[in-house]
Image (cartoon, rainbow, N blue to C red):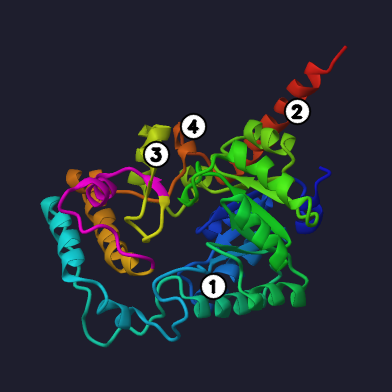
Amino acid sequence: MKSAICDMLGVEFPLVAFSHCRDVVAAVSRAGGFGVLGATGHSPDSVRQELRWIEDHADGKPFGIDVLIPENMATAGESGVTHESLRHRVSDRHRDFARDLLGKAGVTLPETHRGEPDTRPQPFDPEQALRVLDAAFEFPIRLIANALGVPPPAMIEMGKRHGVPVAALVGAREHAIRQVNAGVDILVVQGTEAGGHCGEVSTLVLVPEVIQAIRKIRDVPVLAAGGVMNGGQMAACMAMGAAGVWTGSVWLATTESETTEIFREKMIEASSRDAVRSKSRTGKPARQLRSAWTEAWERDPNSPGPLPMPLQTLVSESALHAVDRAAAAGNPKAREMVTYFVGQGVGLIDSVRSAGQVVQSFKEEFVEAVERLDGLLAD
């Protein structure tokens, strides 16, 4: 295909797949798309293991890496923040609410403090993210991407030094303008339909709005994101001016995905309205599957309200891992609490397929959509 993204990333089909699962990343790249490993939560050593495996299983096809370096969070500007030092900032009220919520479902919340102090860097730690990127450049990555703000100058400099494009996720026109002025190479323009952290403007509105705004500054290719689950939607996004698409939720319902079997079952059962924006997992608005967990934090009159990022993660992650374990053991109340990041496109998921099959379907549906459009212009 003739696309700026194909040229920049060295792919035949401008379908970018974001996944925390290395198996998905390698499978998508092998099939002609471009897999991107979500590396939030990784250390330099663990990301080396993941990228080494991807390199060994991608058949020489290109792949990239994504980190999350927030511009704004409760610990902004602080250095050397650890899980241990953050524990003292989480109120007993928030801990008790989570413990009581799980207790009513018959789920035991594991102890949060045992043995030696937890010296791991704080969740979403900017310094750790840069160390992870530095380790990633030991491998032939073809893209680095960042979410939740303008990439720090060090990240943009890394990309330029290694000749690797830097992508940044945006959810509003003003954010896109800031990113272009900062020097990013690719914009991931993500509508509110998307899973994970997202804004409030729909993909159909946001993509052309951003393209119109940035063409006055410089030519930066756009990847459309948010609710894109098939090749017809991909063709529609490219008809609006996008050079390709960035996808995430569609890969959660694949056999290779990191999600649990129960979550995949709940995805198939869900409608688009079941993907809700909530701060209950990370402290920032993130679209995820509606569950007893999200409902309690957002609607229960006794809820203390989510803490700001990164503090809410210290409350939610261990709790939701316990929920997954209890649900897998057959606890029906725990099953009601199971949730994960997913976009409104969940309503289009009706089965679990392999990642390779999904890529092939995208290609076929894309061609069918383009042919339909061509037919509208036929004499």
What is the x, y in percent for residue 168?
A: 63, 60
Q: Are marks 3 and 4 in contact (CB under 8 Å)?
A: no
Distance Cα–Cα, label 1 vs label 2: 38 Å
Say which element carries label 4: helix
Sequence order check, earlier mark of 1 and 2: 1
Q: Which residues are magenta?
A: 287-309
Query: In this figure, which residue is indicated by the disc labeled 1?
Result: 47
Q: Which mark is residue 348?
A: 4
Q: Are marks 2 and 3 in contact (CB under 8 Å)?
A: no
* Quadrant housing residue 146: bottom right
Query: In this figure, which residue is indicated by the disc labeled 3?
Result: 267
What is the x, y in percent for residue 273?
A: 39, 34
Query: In this figure, which residue is indicated by the disc labeled 2?
Result: 370
- The label nearer to you, 4 versus 1, is 4
What is the x, y in percent for residue 36?
A: 61, 58
Is 171 displayed left or right of 97 in the figure? right
Q: Is residue 309 visible?
A: yes
Amino acid type, callout 1? Val
Say which element carries label 2: helix
Q: Which mark is residue 84?
A: none
Distance Cα–Cα, label 2 vs label 3: 29 Å
- Residue at the far top: name it: 379
